[in-house]
Image (tube, rainbow, N blue to C red):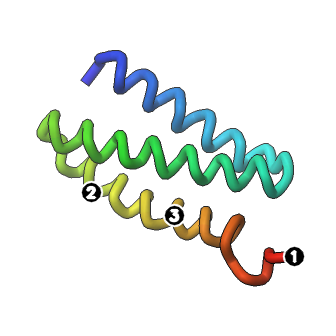
Amino acid sequence: MNGPLEWITSIGTVAAASMIAFDLGRRATAWGFVLFCLVSALWIYIGLTEDAVPLAAMNGVLLLINAWGVWQYWFHPKNSA
């Protein structure tokens, strides 16, 4: 588990966490959650193909949490104009 896909996914995870933690506004936070969803899906793929089931399971849960974040920031009725 030290290939280019793992490195790209690791960097994407750090970028997503930074976008949310720096609180640069609703749009940046929403995109951070989208990026988190993407990298969580990639970690699931990596975990399943590399026989790292705990990694895949953890990111399955994180994918659901981050999808909830996307819902909250982009689609929740309280945020419609």
Q: Say which element carries label 3.
A: helix
Q: Residues within 10 Å of mark 3 (few under 14, many from 20)?
A: some
Give the distance between the C-alpha atoms of the residues marked 3 and 2, in whole angstroms. 15 Å
Q: Which residue is drawn at the image coordinates 43% and 66% (left, top)?
A: 64
Earlier along the polypeptide chain: callout 1 or callout 2?
2
Secondary structure, mark 2, is helix
Q: Amino acid at mark 2?
A: Ala
Q: Upstream in the sequence, badge 1 or badge 3?
A: 3
Which quadrant: the N terminus?
top left
Instruction: Give the Cα separation between the discs numbered 1 and 2.
Output: 37 Å
Mark whose residue sits in front, 1 or 2? 1
Residue denoted by label 1:
81
Q: Quadrant of the C terminus?
A: bottom right
x, y percent for residue 36? 53, 48
Which residue corresponds to the image point at 85% horizontal and 52% vertical from the top-left?
A: 25
Q: Residue furthest left?
A: 51
Foreground pick, 80 / 50? 80
Name the side, left or right, on which 11 lies relative to 47: right
Q: Amino acid at mark 3?
A: Ala
Report which residue position mark 3 lands on.
67
Q: In which image quadrant can residue 62 be found? A: bottom left
* Residue extending furthest toward the bottom: 77
